[in-house]
Amino acid sequence: MTDPKLHFGAFLYTPGQHSAGWRHPDAVPQTDMHFPYYIEMARTAERGLIDTIFLQDTAAIGGSGALDGTSPYRPSQGRQVWLEPTTLIAALAAVTNHIGLIATATTTYNEPYNIARRYATIDHISGGRAGWNLVTSQVEDEAGNFGLDKHVGHGDRYARAGEFYDVVAGLWDSWEADAFLYDKESGQYYDTDKLHFLRHEGEHFRVRGPLNVSRTPQGRPVVAQAGSSDVGRELAARSADLVFTAQLVIPEGQAFRNDIRARAERHGRNPDDIKILPGLMPVIGRTDAEAQEKYERLQSLIDDRLALAALARLTGDLDIYQYDPDGPLPPLPPSNAAKARQDLIVRMAKEDGLSIRQIGRYLGTTQGHRLLVGSPRTVADSMEEWLLAGAADGFNLLFPFFPAPLTDFVDLVVPEIQRRGIYRTEYEGRTLRENLGVSVPPNRFTLNKTGRG
């Protein structure tokens, strides 16, 4: 068995994951809409041999919940506008060569045929580097843009998502890899025996197929999933090649990774074909002291009102603003947004004795993910510890602002982890699947014809 190697996603959450990062003197807030900056960042990540960039999406401006109970506006908060991510990764495919291109598309407010077609097309454009981050919508603001007053329930969203994935995956199998003959002499364009109709009829969807895009360069686009609730884990275990998650300590990471791998095995999958990447925000200096100074500068920029707004999204129907911000977190009603993230902040508040303000500031810094402040050696030590302990296969890297922290990671941390032999020195293959080391799922129709993949 080969020694494990780290895998990374670069989360391009522009203009930065930190709620006040865009205000930093080195930040370029125009990274939210300016395509040349995305080219620069994608190429920087590719220079660092990072597996994939990852683009989040919400089909709304988040934050209709009011800071003062009345206003829907947050003029001090970044992340108000951004480029639609599937269009963006298609464009980035033309200016990069190796790095994966993963974009989010919700199953709550899309249709399977359109999603299957879109990502298959991007996989062809990129030569096998596309990935779909399969999510159910969390932010309630999206509902108002699709004819609803609020989201459907959490369980119902996941039931739709499971069937949505089945339809998309089935459509990706519409054509066998060698279906197209292009035989000018005989006049046969394709082999009819290698074209398959899905004919799906379920609770949520009725889709005939086939897809009007041929089988893609990597067989299917990579599927990423980020749900950590029980139903989210179950969906990830049967559908995902990558799981983006949030664990703060090694025992939690070990338990989550072991659980997902065991569930995947119960679904008949090789557990090595699913990679677990917890979120991690590194704040990097050439020394630990320099990194701490950088962190303190960032924290001095935080607006506590915005930090509380980040918390309010996870408090269900409870108005958190009515409580003393320096008091304890009150009992929270169930959230119809991110259930696992709500569980995390409740546990943090209880175990660490954190106030409402402290929890809000933590969310405003990392959105609930792990923070790591230190020199390249300190950052590498922690990453290596998690990898060797089986708590992660790598990390989804979060950055407080752009583009400097991404460049710092590539220039300072990458050489250190390469020196330790826990990170690649070149891309292993041409496709995202090859670089991640996850196999191509067999075409279901071929499997049914032959009894094997």
Image (spheres, rainbow, N blue to C red):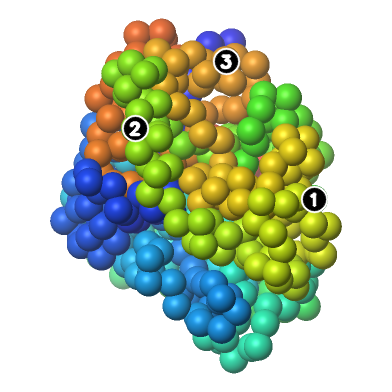
Q: Is residue 198 above or below residue 237?
A: below
If you read the primary sequence from the N terminus, does the residue marked by circle 3 or circle 2 appear first? 2
Identify the secondary structure beneath mark 2: helix
Label pair 3/2, CB-CB below 8 angstroms = no
Identify the secondary structure beneath mark 3: helix
Circle 1: residue type: Asp
Q: Quadrant of the N terminus?
A: top right
Residue 403 at x, y percent in the picture: 25, 44
Checking the image for residue 230, the label placed there is 1
Q: Is residue 27 above or below residue 407?
A: below
Label 2 packing within 10 angstroms: few (<14), some (14-19), many (20+) = some
If you read the primary sequence from the N terminus, does the residue marked by circle 2 or circle 1 appear first? 1
Between tags 3 and 2, which lies in front?
A: 2
Q: 220 or 342: nearer the eye?
A: 342
Q: Distance between the Cα atoms at labels 3 and 2?
A: 24 Å
The residue pinned by badge 3 equals 385
Quarter of the image where one finds residue 244: top right
Q: 221 or 184: nearer the eye?
A: 221
Asked whether, in this view, residue 41 is left or right of residue 217, the answer is left
The residue pinned by badge 2 equals 294
Quarter of the image where one finds residue 204: bottom right
